[in-house]
Amino acid sequence: MVQTTGLRCLGMAVGLIAMSITASACNIPVFRYALERWAPDDCQVLVIHDSPISEDQRQWIDRLTGPIGDDQSKCNVDVQTVDITQSQPAELVAIGRKAATGDAALPLVVVRTKLSRGRWTQQIAGSLNEQLCEQLVASPIRTELRRRLMAGDSVVWLMIPGTNETLNRESRERLERSLESLPEQLELPDGVGLPGSELYSDLPLLLRFSVLEMGDDGVADPYLEKLLIGFQQEAFDEGQPLFIPVFGRGRALEVLPGEMVQEHLIENISRFLCSACSCLVKERNPGFDLMIAAQWENDLFGGIENSPPDRSREEGKNRPPVLLEIPSGR
């Protein structure tokens, strides 16, 4: 896939739908393959400090990696404390010292999200406190996103409304009209269930799409909003809404300003995500994983002992590429 670099504005690219696969061709749709066999990348949470962490602060930090809710879900998160008075680890200390030059008081929380090709984007979440830690791991919008993906939605389009109500309405209506017709236009790949294309979960395999608007319930998600808006800050400042197609275990394909969400692009993105998974290596596919509390193996397979092998980094043979215009991805 052609990838963007940094947080520059989205460009259109020619995507290679068929890249590397295993010796046996895989006919599972991209969205379902990602749900069953791609473990989400950990988001890195750095707690930047220059003095000892107190007992209360330690408990807040432990909350980030502990069980959440009645189902004892856990976030895909890697938490590290970084003492900027020390010299190691050098890379994280450098990040911490740079973040500490702002106005927020230490200890400071920095969230880093892995993009493709080993790149990262980062944001300062704020000064360490109990409420901040709760908001990072417990989010109604991310819970609903997980619920829809686990209920069989092929793609959930997150929407962050802009300040221009007319653009919000027109963009959402345009998206919903296109999504409504897609199940009649698209077809699931032939051969699902054959050797090399087995499904491991009892979840129905459907062509179903939905729109999930952030803020509809009146509850903000500062982490998610700051992360996603950062990819398209200029467009958002102009009042445009942003749309993010999410699939698999909470993998965001790209962040799109409302003006780009046109019928042709919506169809191409959907066709890509619903076509046979021709690139089994997650790192070579566009997108980035959101921080979501879940028990994916338990909910999908009844336990990790029943789950298929993690194929996030498996290499395979090449198949001739099929060209389709899709967003460059992250």
Image (cartoon, rainbow, N blue to C red):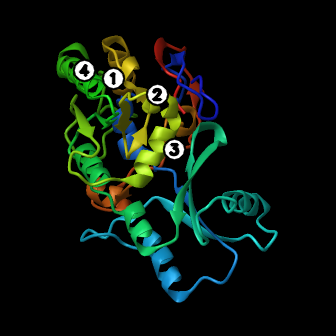
The answer to whether residue 247 is left or right of residue 81 is left
Name the amino acid, label 1. Ser
Q: Is residue 289 visible?
A: no
Residue in front for this viewpoint, 325 or 170? 170
Quarter of the image containing the N terminus? top right
Count residues near mark 3 (Cα–Cα under 10 Å), then give few for <14, some for 14-19, many for 20+: some
Answer few, some or many: residues within 10 Å of disc 4's Cα (few below 14, many 20 plus, some between 14 and 19): few
Q: Which mark is residue 312?
A: 3
Mark 2 and mark 1 lie on one chain; the one further toward the N terminus is: 2
Q: Looking at numbered disc 3 in the image, what kind of residue is underneath it?
A: Ser
The mark that comes first in sequence, 4 or 3, is: 4
* Circle 2: residue type: Ala
| Placement of 275 over or under 225, stated as above or below | above
Residue marked by disc 2: 235
For the residues bearing labels 2 and 1, Cβ distance under 8 angstroms: no
Rendered location of residue 63, percent (x, y): 43, 74
Q: Which residue is mark 4?
A: 170
Q: Position of residue 136 (x, y in %)?
A: 42, 61
The reply, left or right, for residue 52 in relation to residue 226 is right
* Precedes in sequence: disc 4 or disc 1: 4
Q: CA distance from mark 1 to mark 3?
A: 21 Å
Please provide percent x and percent y for residue 310.
47, 49
Q: Does residue 41 lie above or below 14 as drawn?
A: below
Residue at image x 37%, y 41%?
Answer: 248
Seen from the viewer's position, the closer of residues 87 and 124 is 124
- Could one spot residue 248 in this view of the protein? yes
Residue at the image position 43 percent from the left and 66 percent from the top: 132
- The residue carrying mark 1 is 270
Q: Crowdedness of circle 1 by 10 Å Cα count: few (<14), some, many (20+)? A: many
Using the rendered view, name the quadrant where residue 153 is placed. top left
> Disc 3 on helix, strand or loop?
loop
